[in-house]
Image: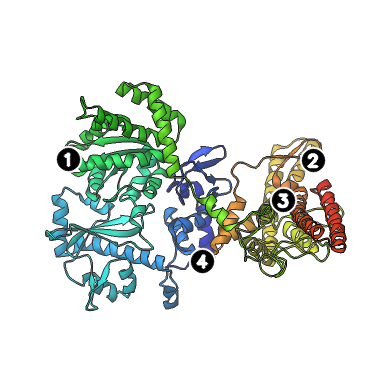
Amino acid sequence: MPVIDRETQQRIKDAANIVEVAGDYVKLTRRGANYMGLCPFHNERTPSFSVSPRRNFCHCFSCKKGGSPVNFLMEKEGVSYTEALLILAKKYGIHVEQRELSDEERRRMSEREAMLVANEWAMNYFHDNLYNTEEGRDIGLAYLYGRGITDEAIRQFRLGYAIDRGDALLSRARSEGHDIEVFKKIGLVGTSQQGRDYDRFRGRVIFPVRNASGKPVAFGGRALKGEAAKYINSPESTLYVKSNELYGIFEAKADAIKFDRIYLMEGYLDVISSWQAGLHNSVASSGTALTESQINLIHRFTDNVTLIYDGDSAGIKASLRGIDMLLSQKLHVKVLLLPEGEDPDSFAKKHTPEEFINYINSHQTDFIHYKLSVLLKDAAGNPQQISEAVRSVVTSIASIPDEIERISYIKECARMVDIDEKVIARQVAQTMLTLSQMTRPTYRQDFNSSVTIPKDGRQEPPSGTQTGGPETNTAPQSPQTGQEAPAGQAGQAESPQLSRYMRQEEQILKYCVRYGFLPVPFYEDEDPLSVLDFVDAEMQADNILFSHAPFLKIFEYLKDKAPEFAEAAERNAAEVERRLLEEREQFREGLRNRGGSLAKIRNEEEKFLATETLRRQDLLNQFAISFSIDLLINHEDREMREIANSLVAERHTLSAIYSNAGGETLAEEDKLAELVPRALSELRAEILNRKVQELQAQVVKAIENDDRELQQQLMARLAKTLSMRSEIAENLGERIISPR
C-alpha cells in the first residue's frame, strides 16, 4: 500500500468529480443544479441520493451516507482513506509514488483490506497460470477455446486456471510473504482434519467475481475432469455475500447506463458469450434465486431489465419468480424465453452477433404478455387454469408501485383475457391489501417497546434509564437560570435514541458545521465572532451542553481545530491578496490599453476596487466555510462523517431568505446573525417547555398530598419559568439574557 504525500493527495481531491465518481455506481438524473439517483448504500424505490456538483458532495437523505468523492468511495467500497485516493488517482490518471509497506503498516491493515489484496493477488495468479504454464494452456485454455471463448473475453473477465496440485497457490503465496490466514478466510486455502493446509481450487477454470468497482470479491471454479461438484465457489465472508453480487456487473455498468437496460441471465458463460456477441450490459445471478440486494444493484444503473432464461421448465419457473420482485422495486420488466434446449451461451454461439442482438430485440416481451402466454399455453377450455393464470398476472400488477403504470396494465390484462376491467381492478386492489399486510414494517412497534409515553404526554425513556440526577430522573438545572439543562451536563450525554432536544441541537450544530469558522457580526456594537465562538459563549452563559453525545463530540472537535484554522486562514489570506493583486494589475493594464478620458478611467477603477472588496470577503468566507466541512466529511470517525454529511447536504437548493430591509433576498450565510441566535433561543424555549411540564406535574402532586408549602415554592418557580418562556417567545431570534 503506497503512502501518498500531501501535495499528491490534494491533486487527487481537486481532480475528483463527485458526479463522475458516484455515476460509476448510480444512474443519476439532473434535478435543477443537482443530480438525484437511487442510493447505492441501501435498498430504496424512490431516489433520495443527491449529488451536488457545486459542492462536489453527495448525500442520501434516507440513510445519511455520502460525502466527498474520497468519502463516498470509503463508504461504498469499505476501503481506507489511502485506498480511496488510489482508486481516484487511477481513474484520473494521476501518478502516485509507491513504496513497500513496513511490517507495522502491514499489520495494521484491516481484515477487509487484506482480503481484497489477497483476492487481487489470486486473480492475477490464476490468470497468469492460464497463459504461462503448460498445464494452464493444455487444459484450462484449451477448454475455454473449446467453448468458443476468445482471448479478448478471457482478458476482459480475467479468467484463470488453478493448477491441479494440492499446494500450488499455497506455496506461491507463502514464498511471496502473504498471510495464509487471510487466504483461509476468503476460501482459497483449506485445512484438512489432519491439520494440513491445501488449495481449495485445483484443476479448475477460474471465474473471478468482481464487484461494481472491479474489485475481486470471490471466485467460481469449473471442474474439467468430471468431478462430482461441477462448480465450487468461494464461501461467504465479511468481503463476499453471494446474494449481494451480480456476475459481470463491473463489465456491464457502462453500457447499462448508456443503453438504459440490463440483461439478467443465470451463469458465468451466459454472460461471457453474450458479451462476445455485443451484449455488454449482461449480468448473472450465478445460480442463486434473485434477491432484493441484487435488484437494488441493477436499479442503481437502470430502471429497465430483461430476463433471459433457458427455454426449459426450470428457466420458466426462474423467470416467473423474479418478475414480481423486480416489479415491486419499480423496475420495468421484459422477458425473453429462448427456444427449448437453448441457453444464452449456446444460442449466442449458434448465431452471429447481429442475429443474436436482433433476436433479443424482436422477441423480448412485456411481462404481462409473457406470463399469460406461458400460463395459458395449455389452459384452453380449463377455467381453473385460466383463473390461476389471471391471479398470477394480478399479483404481478399489484406489485407495481406506480399507480398510472398499474392502471395501464389492468386495462391490458382485461383486454387480453376478455374479463371486465372493473373485476381485474378489484382483484388487484385486494391483492395489494394482502401484500401490504404481509410486509407491514415493525419499526413503530420496536420504537414503542423502547420508549414509554406517560399520561401527561411527555416522552420518557424506559424504566431504569437515567437521564439526569440519580434521584429525580430529570436533567440537571442551570445554576444561573434555574432552567432544565440538557442531559450531558452531568457528565454523561443521553443516548441518541432518547435525546430530548435532538431537533433544536441539530439546527445549532448545522450552523457550526457549515459556518463554524465564519466571522459574523452578531451585534453592531461588538467585534465579529465566529459562529463557533458565539455558540460556545452563549451555551456556557446558560450552562447548556449538547445532550446528544455525537453532537457534543463534533462541536468539541471543531473548537479544538480553531488554532489550526487560524494558521490556515492566514496563509489563505496571503494567497487571496496575491491573486487580487494580479487581477488588479491585469485590470489596470487593460485600462491603459483601452485609453479614454481620465475621469472615465478613475470611474472604472473605483468600480473595480469596490468589486474587489466584495470578492476578497467572498474568497475569505468560502475558505472558512469549506475548512470545517472538509475536516468533518473526510474524518476517520464514521459516525462524525455521517452526521456531518447529513448537516451539510440539502434536499433542495437553499431557499433565499428575505431580509427585513427592502425585501432583498439573502443566502443562508448572510443571515447567520439572525439564524444562529434564533436556533439557540429555540433550544432554550424547548428546555423551558419541558421544565414547565415537569413543574406542573409536581404542583398537581403537591396539591394531592396537601403540601401547601411545597405547592407555593413550586408555583413561584413555575411563574418564573413561564415568564422566561414568554420572553423567549416574544423575542425569538434575538439575544435572550435570562434573569440571573
Q: Which residue is at a point 70% across and 58% down the rendered structure image?
A: 517
Circle 3 residues within 10 Å: few <14, some 14–19, many ≥20:
some
**Spatial separation of the CA atoms under disc 1 and disc 3:** 70 Å
Q: Amino acid at mark 2?
A: Arg
Assess whether mark 3 and mark 1 are in contact (beta carbons under 8 angstroms): no
Indicate which disc residue 342 carries.
1
- Picture quadrant of residue 141: bottom left
For mark 1, does the 10 Å Cα neighbourhood hold few (<14), some (14 to 19), or many (20 or more) residues?
Answer: some
Measured in 3D between alpha carbons, the distance from the residue under mark 2 to the one under mark 4, in whole angstroms, is 48 Å
Residue 616: mark in rendering: 3
Looking at the picture, how far across and down is residue 602, in whole percent? 79, 40
What's the colour scheme? rainbow
- Residue on which the image places disc 4: 5
Mark 2 highlights which residue? 602
**In the image shown, does 86 or 645 lie closer to the viewer?**
645
SS class, disc 3: helix
